Image: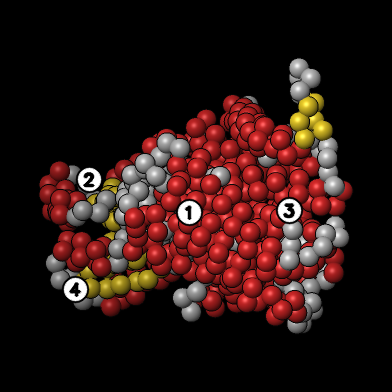
């Protein structure tokens, strides 16, 4: 079993990176890895791992929904009014109905079975949409009008609706469900009549549970300080989120996925510094979780049943997306400030299928519903077609269809490559400059450019400086650079050329007349550089 985990992680990572180097989304390589490793081809994944795939997918989806919640922006959502709410119901509903109507003549389904297929195919994939939207937010695409936030919220709400209807349809088709529900006051409703109340209840209780969980986390982790570091914060938060996802299996009064997303959202409002630390942690967790999610998803695809339904399956997907879902997008954005390009972006940005289809696509077949094998095959086809297409099309189309706005670093993790420039001479103060630079580099995992501008040729002194640099920056990635010319000009130009975040340099200032002579270089750099300059003073360091 451990061998299977190694195969999944290493093969998924390297083939995913190979896909990225070929300008394709990494998840395409991960899905391909699953197909190659799975029972259809090499059959090297242990049966116990495949049996546990649903549980592992649950963990992965929990992580991605926490990332989504921690990346939501309340101000941008409030600007959109009801657009996010309409995106949560209309596109998925109209797509499910369109698929049901087409499935009746194509596969000779009755309407409930066709609608069951529509609920499976109409659900949107958080595993594809959430990281793609968060990446757009980190780059600024569509953030001015809150388009990524509206898509993230709408996607979560639509999955709540479709999963509820799916559960009712499975019960109806397997048991002929005619369950009666008695409300307060003696009013009796069928399960279908009760559906709108059930949807509303799951949304309200999901938001409430998420808020209470966020309050408790802030109380334990921040106010009572039960944890000592970020790793412990992430551990407690992840366990809490997973508990919220699992609990509805025993207490089905709220949407676990919505509660997790809401918990992340409320954490931003209640304690932004905690939310920022958790955001970084869940970003790191997702790097591992996505490999398991997409490799196991590929391993679950049954290639042998795709051939018979390939053409009608593509027709189903086309009708559902290009007729049902596009009509839903149009109605959802009526009265909004979205232009036609931003509405068109919903086609690649809001139609990927993967996670939900992998989780529930096999349930009709397992429950003995007629046409279950066809439903499973179309679910697999929807993953193979729309997940890679969506993951590829979102970053390609966003710069063409969306406007770029200012990035809010309090809502997303903005990953930047940190480079520090240490400007040193051959004097003793270079040791203090390099020591300070090393400390800063370790804190921010930065790279270092060590710059020495040669005025007087002294090979022995430069060689000694290189040895000193190698000793003090032994655990840091650095580059030693020597230039000739005006010292201040070369320092400023090198900082620009290497796109550094900060310049660190020394200044000896024991006497006022020495400051005029020796401090003139640092003073000139400070006055002429647009990049922040940190000056290490010899006398100050020696005093400390």
543 sits to left or right of 210: left
373 sits to left or right of 314: right
**Cα distance between the residues tagged 2 and 4:** 28 Å
Looking at the image, which residue is at 52% across and 69% down? 389
Looking at the image, which residue is at 37% across and 43% down? 336
Q: Where does the image place residue 54, in percent across and percent down from the top left? A: 76, 58
Closer to viewer: mark 2 or mark 4: 4
**Cα distance between the residues tagged 2 and 1:** 75 Å
Lower position in the chain sequence, tag 3 or tag 2? 3
**Cα distance between the residues tagged 3 and 2:** 87 Å
Q: Is residue 166 above or below residue 270?
A: below
Residue beneath label 1, please? 327
Residue beneath label 4, please? 484
In depth, the one of 494 and 188 nearer the eye is 188
Residue beneath label 2, please? 510
Q: Which picture quadrant has residue 366?
A: bottom right
**Helix or strand or loop: what does disc 2 sit on?**
loop
Q: Where does the image place residue 24, in percent across and percent down from the top left? A: 50, 74
Q: Which mark is residue 112?
A: 3
Q: Where does the image place residue 32, in percent across and percent down from the top left? A: 64, 76
The C terminus is located in which quarter?
top left
Which residue ends up furthest to the bottom in the rendered image? 41
**Cα distance between the residues tagged 4 and 3:** 79 Å
Q: Where does the image place residue 118, in percent across and percent down from the top left? A: 65, 57
Neighbour class for label 1 at 10 Å: few (<14), some, many (≥20)? some
Closer to viewer: mark 2 or mark 1: 1
**Helix or strand or loop: what does disc 3 sit on?**
helix
Neighbour class for label 3 at 10 Å: few (<14), some, many (≥20)? some
Looking at the image, which residue is at 19% across and 55% down? 529
């Amino acid at each position: 079993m451990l061998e299977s985990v190694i195969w999944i992680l290493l093969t998924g990572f390297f083939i995913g990176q190979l896909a990225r180097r070929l300008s394709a989304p990494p998840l395409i390589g991960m899905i391909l890895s699953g197909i190659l490793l799975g029972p259809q081809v090499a059959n090297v994944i242990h049966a116990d791992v495949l049996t546990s795939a649903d549980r592992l997918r649950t963990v992965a989806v929990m992580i991605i929904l926490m990332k989504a919640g921690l990346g939501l922006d309340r101000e941008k959502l409030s600007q959109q009014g009801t657009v996010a709410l309409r995106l949560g119901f209309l596109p998925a509903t109209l797509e499910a109905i369109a698929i049901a109507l087409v499935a009746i003549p194509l596969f000779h389904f009755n309407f409930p079975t066709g609608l069951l297929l529509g609920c499976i195919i109409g659900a949107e994939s958080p595993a594809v949409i959430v990281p793609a939207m968060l990446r757009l937010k980190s780059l600024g695409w569509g953030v001015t009008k809150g388009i990524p936030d509206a898509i993230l919220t709408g996607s979560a709400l639509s999955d709540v609706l479709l999963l509820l209807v799916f559960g009712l349809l499975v019960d109806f088709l397997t048991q002929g469900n005619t369950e009666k529900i008695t409300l307060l006051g003696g009013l009796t409703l069928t399960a279908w009549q009760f559906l709108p109340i059930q949807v509303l209840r799951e949304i309200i209780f999901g938001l409430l549970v998420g808020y209470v969980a966020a309050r408790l986390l802030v109380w334990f982790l921040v106010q009572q300080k039960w944890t000592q570091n970020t790793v412990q914060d992430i551990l407690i938060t992840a366990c809490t989120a997973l508990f919220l996802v699992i609990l509805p299996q025993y207490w089905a009064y709220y949407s676990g996925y919505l509660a997790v997303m809401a918990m992340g959202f409320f954490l931003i409002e209640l304690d932004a510094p905690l939310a920022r630390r958790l955001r970084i942690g869940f970003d790191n967790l997702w790097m591992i979780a996505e490999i398991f999610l997409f490799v196991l998803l590929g391993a679950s695809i049954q290639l042998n049943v795709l051939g018979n339904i390939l053409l009608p399956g593509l027709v189903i997907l086309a009708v559902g997306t290009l007729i049902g879902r596009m009509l839903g997008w149009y109605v959802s954005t009526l009265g909004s400030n979205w232009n036609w390009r931003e509405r068109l972006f919903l086609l690649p940005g809001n139609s990927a299928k993967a996670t939900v289809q992998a989780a529930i696509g096999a349930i009709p077949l397992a429950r003995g519903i007629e046409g279950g094998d066809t439903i499973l095959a179309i679910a697999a086809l929807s993953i193979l077609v729309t997940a890679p297409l969506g993951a590829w099309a979102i970053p390609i189309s966003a710069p063409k269809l969306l406007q770029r706005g200012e990035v809010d670093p309090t809502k997303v993790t903005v990953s930047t490559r940190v480079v520090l420039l240490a400007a040193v001479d051959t004097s003793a103060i270079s040791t203090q400059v390099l020591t300070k630079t090393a400390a800063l580099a370790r804190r921010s995992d930065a790279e270092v450019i060590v710059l020495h501008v040669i005025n007087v040729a002294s090979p022995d002194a430069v060689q000694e400086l290189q040895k000193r640099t190698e000793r003090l920056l032994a655990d840091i990635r650095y580059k030693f650079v020597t230039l000739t010319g005006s010292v201040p000009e070369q320092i400023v130009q090198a900082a620009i050329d290497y796109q550094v975040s900060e310049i660190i340099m020394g200044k000896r200032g024991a006497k006022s007349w020495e400051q005029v002579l020796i401090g003139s270089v640092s003073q000139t750099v400070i006055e002429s550089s647009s990049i922040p300059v940190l000056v290490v003073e010899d006398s100050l360091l020696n005093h400390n």
